[in-house]
Image (tube, rainbow, N blue to C red):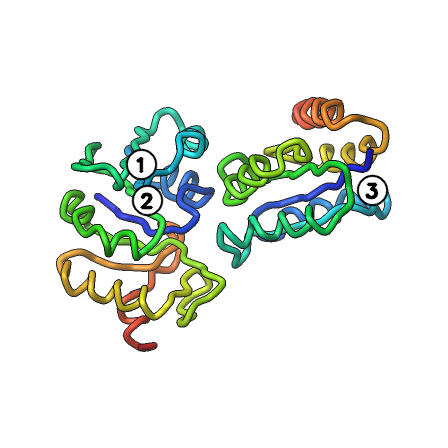
Amino acid sequence: MRIIRIDERLIHGQVIIGWIEATSIRTLTLIHNNMNTHYLNLYRNMIDPDIEFLTVDISSDNYQFTGRENALFIIEDIETLSDNCSIIDLIKPDLINIGGIMHDKYDIDLLDFVKLTNAEANELIELQNHYSDVKFNARELPDSKEHNIIKLIKKHL
Amino acid sequence: MNIFGIFTGHHDYSASAVSAALSIIGSQNDYRCLSNRGRDINSMYSDIEEIIKSSDSDHFFVFIDFYGSSFSIPATRIKDNFNKKITLLFGYNLPVIVDFFLHRPNKTPKELYDKLVSIGKEAIS
């Protein structure tokens, strides 16, 4: 299982404990845009040493993704993923999971943990149209309620 | 030195834990409790920053429920930006909160930090 999780908090309690401890995920990749080493190390130190922790800087040329099959890839926002579709092409995920997007300024209040601008909603729809073989959902934890994010957005647009 | 306490955590953890501590030692001033509920990373940072900017305290202890929780990065950014005025303490329990309030009037931030880390560890047996 290869999952891309979009979460503006990146790595935090739900990811460290909720996902990694409760699933068979063995590799966690933090996808970032030129984040400084100080903060990358902070994130690295949050992860159990038994879990393979990788970082991929999408501001660099020819970035690649490695890691085992059961892998979770964390990215900050929809816009970054939408602007860099090669991430999806390279990872070939089974699932794109919205884990938490909570702006102060948003247009659509979809769920407690998903509040999107219209632009983000449209970008997500476009991504789903382009990658129709990939499942899209919104879910905080592996055992919490799963939401059909595309259906929810379409209701609101 | 006047030391302000900012207690952060998941859902009601900080407010409930501090409330429990105050039921033991009585009411206190110069502290705030923050929750991550419904807050994004930038809001969590702003919540802490606002407290610091609006207070005339000399020093601030920011308590984070555990290393890796969603307040970890905002609190670390606060430390980076306000450096000398901030002490971060990850992983706090009831004895830590009680001793923070009891000992903050007569200790330096470094002495208080060492005391709280020691108390927190000793409290688990």
What amino acid is at disc 3? Answer: Ile
Which numbered dot is residue A28? 1
Q: Is residue A43 above or below residue B40?
A: above
Do pointers 3 and 1 mark residues of a single chain?
no
Q: Which residue is mark 2?
A: A74
Q: Are marks 1 and 2 in contact (CB under 8 Å)?
A: yes
What amino acid is at disc 1? Answer: Leu
- Give whichever of B68, A116 is nearer the camera: A116
Q: Position of residue A128 (x, y in %)?
A: 19, 62
Q: Is residue A149 above or below residue B44?
A: below
Q: Which residue is mark 3?
A: B24
Q: CA distance from mark 1 to mark 2?
A: 8 Å
Q: Are marks 2 and 3 in contact (CB under 8 Å)?
A: no
Q: Position of residue A144 (x, y in %)?
A: 40, 55
- Give whichever of A83, A134 is nearer the camera: A83
Q: Position of residue A77 (x, y in %)?
A: 34, 53
Q: Chain of mark 3?
A: B
Q: Chain of mark 2?
A: A
Q: Residue at x 72, y 51 (%)?
A: B54
Q: Residue at x 71, y 49 (%)?
A: B32
Q: Position of residue A17 (x, y in %)?
A: 43, 40
Q: Secondary structure at mark 1?
A: strand
- Who comes first in sequence, dot 1 or dot 2? 1
What amino acid is at disc 2? Answer: Ile
